[in-house]
Image (spheres, rainbow, N blue to C red):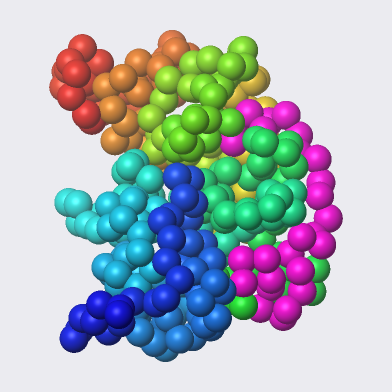
Amino acid sequence: MLLFDHKLGRPLPFQDEIGDDESGNGYALRMLCANGLQFADLARAAASIGHTYMPASAVPYLSYAFGASLSRLQRAIPRTYSRKGRRRSAFLGHDFSRTYQLRYTRPQVCPACLAVPRAQLQAVWEISFYTSCVVHGCFLADECVCGRGLLWRRNSPLECSCGADLRAIGVQNADSSSLAVSSLIAAHVSCGAPEYGGVGLGAPLGALSLDTLLRLVRALGISESSCGDDLVPGRLTRLLSSSEAVSVVRRAWDRLDAGPSMFSKHPPVWQLEEVLGGATSSDLRVLRAVLKDDEPEVSRWLTQHRWEQLDLLKGGQDG
């Protein structure tokens, strides 16, 4: 006889543990499909009838209903909170100082991964600049063949809300810069993922924390113009589509590869603030080497913010 909780109800008959690298929302969708239920049924019970994804507040119910470990499930669903007046997110054991670095409301998939038997939707796919699958070397997609953006509110992990098979999405080979950044991200969050073994830019960037790495990529690649004069209000902080994220990664990688010349045209203040502001002491050491702190603009910013006086570069505390 199944257990019964007067608040949470009765757990569902088919239960399973969440996978090591599985997305929390992907797990919920997989278990709904296994139990013959619709997303709307879960949204009504765990969040609200209009929800298109499972928020962190739904974790206790999901754990009870589907049988997953509470701690493993909490890790796999982003949790938003405030610190010193700024909204942040906790996900996969990492802290993200910019909530728009996560795309848990707008999922993306690897069509090649979905074609594998017993495929699971991966949590790392919910990180904005994870643009390519490091296993299959192809780009991720956030649109169905029907042209609609993907949602968690669909019939199964393998189907779009329109009913089309997501495995039918064309596989496109990823470029080297997208694979390099995705490999760096995977090394931070995926169980058993090999450390990025690339040379050149990959070596120092692999020493950065995940949050600083993502902020560096966004700051250097979000603007098509090197001086940032093409930016408009809201563009800096909005959630990017998969194709937009690929473009940002490419520009950031090219500008990093260009070295000191990236600051030759006086970068906007927001760019330096985004890259350096709030970085940990260990991150700052790496950034000073990568960004060439003898460049006038970088040196001036560091001096104005008195990192040396605050002992951030000498001590072991976070900035």
Q: Indicate the quadrant where residue 15 lies.
A: bottom left
At x 77% / y 60%, what residue is drawn? 167
Q: Residue 136 versus residue 248: which sits nearer the camera? A: 136
Q: Which percent across, then down, holds residue 247?
A: 69, 44
Q: Locate residue 249 relative to residue 8 in the image: left or right.
A: right
Q: Which residues are magenta?
A: 156-182
Magenta stretch: helix, strand or loop mostly? loop
Q: Indicate the quadrant where residue 202 lies.
A: top right
Above-or-below relation of 242 to 20: below
Q: Locate residue 280 relative to residue 43 in the image: left or right.
A: left
Q: For the C terminus, which image quadrant?
A: top left
Q: Can see residue 177?
A: yes
Q: Residue 73 versus residue 198: which sits nearer the camera? A: 73
Q: Which percent across, then down, holds residue 4?
A: 24, 82
Q: Is residue 164 magenta?
A: yes
Above-or-below relation of 177 to 22: above
At x 66% / y 61%, what residue is drawn? 142
Q: Locate residue 160 relative to residue 154 in the image: left or right.
A: right
Q: Locate residue 202 relative to residue 146 in the image: left or right.
A: left
Q: Residue 3 versus residue 187: which sits nearer the camera? A: 3
Q: Which percent across, then down, holds residue 275?
A: 42, 34
Question: How many numbered badges does the structure rendering display?
Answer: 0
Above-or-below relation of 113 to 174: below
Q: For the N terminus, which image quadrant?
A: bottom left
Q: Is residue 64 magenta?
A: no
Q: Which percent across, then down, holds residue 182?
A: 59, 36
Q: Which residue in the rendered view is the most extreme toward the front?
A: 1
